[in-house]
Image (cartoon, rainbow, N blue to C red):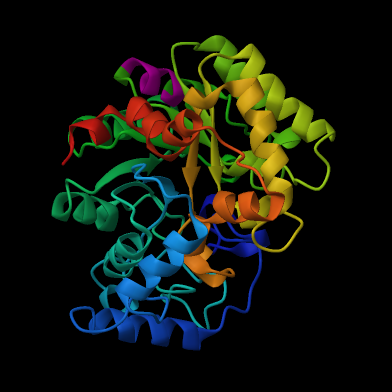
Amino acid sequence: RDPRHRPWGEGGGLMGPGRCGVRLERYASLACRCRRATTAAPASGRTRREARAMASSTTTTTTTMRIDSHLHVWAPKERADEYPYYGSLIGSAKANEPPMPGHVEVLLQEMESAGVSKAVIIQPGNHMFDHAYVSHVLREHPDKFVGVLLANPAGGPSAGARELERLVTEEGYVGVRFNPYLWDRDNGETMDNAVGRAMYERAGQLGVPVSHMPFKGLLGHLKEITALADAFPQTKFIVDHFGFCKCGDLQSEEWQALLSLGREYPQAYVKLSAAFRVSEQEYPYADVRQATRNLIESFGKERLMWGTDFPWVTEQPRGYVGAWSIIAASDEAAGEALLTREEEEHIFHKTARSLFPKLGKQG
């Protein structure tokens, strides 16, 4: 089979956390709360006032704006006919059901509880190249969200670039995601082939950054990433989720490779997102602390931004609200602050506003 047409989640998943068996009762619980949104508690099960109080008890007493630089939304299963899914999903009992609630109504509740003003929506793998649901959300909430499209490497060199341009110029998307596993790697295709180069170059010409998702390890895609960066230096690029570099060994080859990107490529950025994917410790992921400091030293505060990876984070300890308290909770344990006020402001909102100027024009 063409790997572009395999069920989403096969072989470890295209966008999922690489594990199965998510309990479906979680979906029913969150979906029920969402339907009671006008009167019920937020998705955490607490009142909004209690959620904010808990968040403030574990965060610094700051008024720093919060922009979530990395999350996904997908349609509720009740609207699958209108917004179809791409095959069977991780943790689902059958096709056409998401592994957990990820629709915008749930997200908005979580953002309110966490004090998050705006967010960058990454087109999810379960809707694949059908951007209809994300586009719908962007139209309904233009002051809250901007969107990053999923690059389509199928077809000739011009096909993907044309669709990329259409989504940027006609539907207002502000970035492009390169998922390397959508290229036919079994037949030697890589992100820096003719199709990838055409899309990467066009992104730079349109002034939108390209995000890389090295889900199975940064080292396996480093040559592709640097080849594109060398060929088209005007295109800014982002490495998602700490580069998927495990924080248990900060001297590892993959960590040294990630840090070198910051020193060698001024157009390179990193998302400090989905800490639960890279930490080898329990919440609040103390090993992420030194990793963050190392990244600041290599990239500078101006090229780093915080993200949660909603809705996957809702299955983790402390959930969405807790994802915004990771640094503060580790500060408390360490007895000292990891970030200066200026660093916090850049990581929590200024970098995202600089990289995605449309965020600065909203609200």
Location of residue 281 in the rendering, given as x and y in whole percent from the top left corner: 75, 59
- Quarter of the C terminus within the rendering: top left
Left or right: 298 as drawn, with respect to 210: right
Location of residue 178 in the rendering, given as x and y in whole percent from the top left corner: 50, 37
Magenta stretch holds residue 114: no
* Depth check, front residue: 272 or 76: 272
Rendered view: 99 above or below 7: below
- Quarter of the N terminus within the rendering: bottom right
- How many numbered markers are drawn? 0
Rendered view: 192 above or below 34: above
Left or right: 170 as drawn, with respect to 47: left
Asked whether residue 3 appears in the rendered view, the answer is no
Left or right: 335 as drawn, with respect to 355: right
Left or right: 81 as drawn, with respect to 11: left
Location of residue 181 in the rendering, given as x and y in whole percent from the top left corner: 60, 45
* Depth check, front residue: 337 or 2: 337
Rendered view: 89 above or below 11: below
Q: Main secondary structure of the magenta part?
A: helix
Quarter of the rendering containing residue 277: bottom right
Quarter of the rendering containing residue 146: top left
Location of residue 246 in the rendering, given as x and y in whole percent from the top left corner: 75, 46
Residue displayed at 23% across by 50% down: 135
Asked whether residue 290 appears in the rendered view, the answer is yes
**Magenta-drawn segment:** 199-205
Residue displayed at 48% across by 47% down: 307
